[in-house]
Amino acid sequence: MDKSIPVEKNDCIEAVCEDLTHDGSGVVKIDGYPIFVPGVLPGEKASIKIIKVNKGYGFGKLVDILERSPFRVDVSPEEAHKYGGCQLQHISYEGQLNSKENLVRQAMARIGKLENAAIHPVLGMENPWNYRNKAQVPVGQKDGKLIAGFYKPRSHEIIDTDESLIHLPEVNEAIKVVKEICSKLEIQPFNEEKHTGILRHIMARYGKESGELMIILVTRISDLPHKSHLVEKILAALPNVRSIIQNINTKKTNVILGEKTKVLWGSDVIYDNIGDVKFAISPLSFYQVNPVSTKVLYDKALEYAGLTGKETVIDAYCGIGTISLFMAKKAKKVYGVEIVPDAVKDAKRNASLNGITNAKFEAGLAETVIPKWYEEGIVADVFVVDPPRKGCDSTLLETIIEMKPKKVVYVSCNPATLARDLRILEDGGYQTKQIQPVDMFPHTTHVECVAEIVLK
């Protein structure tokens, strides 16, 4: 036994939860030794059984709550499966926003060592339910019947459900209808273990402003039986459908979508608006899933950019042009770069769709393309970054520091990598003026942030 570890496996302890981790587990400490316990909330005193002990941390199981948090919400087993991957379903919305603000503050203090940045309270939703414009549900079989829903936590067992509390009603209805039609047509569900069957996932994408619906059927093989009947029945049941797509994924993989896509009926895209900017959304394109909070997020990014119409803007992770096109309406010129060539095609199409002529898009690595632009004399007044969870590439941060734009607007989906990158920019001559967290994903542990960073 390691004397430096104050608990052993199977010990039963009583402790007060101090914090939440990024995956929603409670953190209790015994003599400074952290133990992660799913289901317990900050401020709660709980009875806990130790189930695993590592050198630096342990894991526990919640046995009983001895003192409840005022933010605790009781969720029935019938309701629980309707959340589909929501780690904070047992916390009131006020408690969730408090927790997310605390997560951002801790990351900025611990990782970023930021002392002077103003961190604002999280901008939450008036109605934090039924917000997702996209659903992708796995398909399987139980007792000879086609089922589709969510995976049981920490497993690949599918819980059959027709409703999710976080999807838009139109998305819930689309998934339910398509599932019933596929079942009646006896389209064989996918068997993950044996890698047999046909239908792997049912996906629905919905334009909240346009009302347009896209159905995507992900299949293991290219041959989809009863194709014409399937299309006919979907169109009869769902009048808002503008696009029915088959995506073929032949691989043994957890990745949902394969590389080959074909249109079974209608258009290859649907359209939607964020504010006054219109976007074409293809089956594979990244488009924010919470349209209400996306508008809040982009408005804040635009506010922080402080554009007057004279600025050159570089958008380093432009995707399908969402932020770039928002900026282009207020800037002199916008340059966007994105690693995914199809996304760049979408960005160009979206610029054309909106009659925007002052935005240029290029495919490639931001850390390769932007230094090349710099050599060509393209210098940004405002730099916008919206990187993946791993944060910005170090070469890109070095380029920003060398280029010295007056302002950097950093949109982040991960407070830890945001804090790390802000520290690098601060050490390179910048100051983090303010950080605005936005709740893009209620009932999950994720929080988005926009940071305004100025040249000292």
Image (cartoon, rainbow, N blue to C red):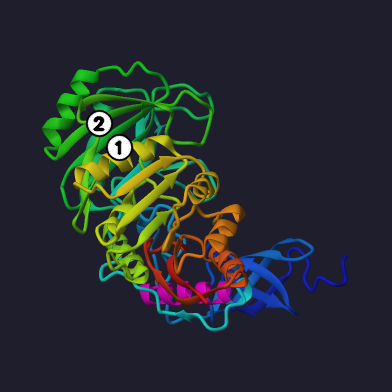
Disc 1 vs disc 2: Cβ atoms closer than 8 Å?
yes
| Placement of 69 over or under 343, stated as above or below | below
Q: From the image, give the main secondary structure of the stretch colored magenta.
A: helix
105 with respect to 134 (left or right): right
| Placement of 165 over or under 319, stated as above or below | below
- Mark 1 residue type: Ser
Q: Is residue 80 visible?
A: no
Query: Where does the magenta region start and end?
Result: 92-108
| Placement of 452 over or under 385, stated as above or below | below
Residue at the disc numbered 2: 268
- Mark 2 residue type: Asp
Q: Residue at x 38, y 61 (%)?
A: 441
Q: CA distance from mark 1 to mark 2?
A: 6 Å
Residue at the disc numbered 1: 282
Q: Is residue 450 magenta?
A: no
69 with respect to 171 (left or right): right
Q: Residue at x 21, y 24 (%)?
A: 230
**Count of all numbered marks drawn on residues in the image:** 2
Q: Quadrant of residue 360?
A: top left
- Could you tell me residue 249's position as x and y percent? 44, 26
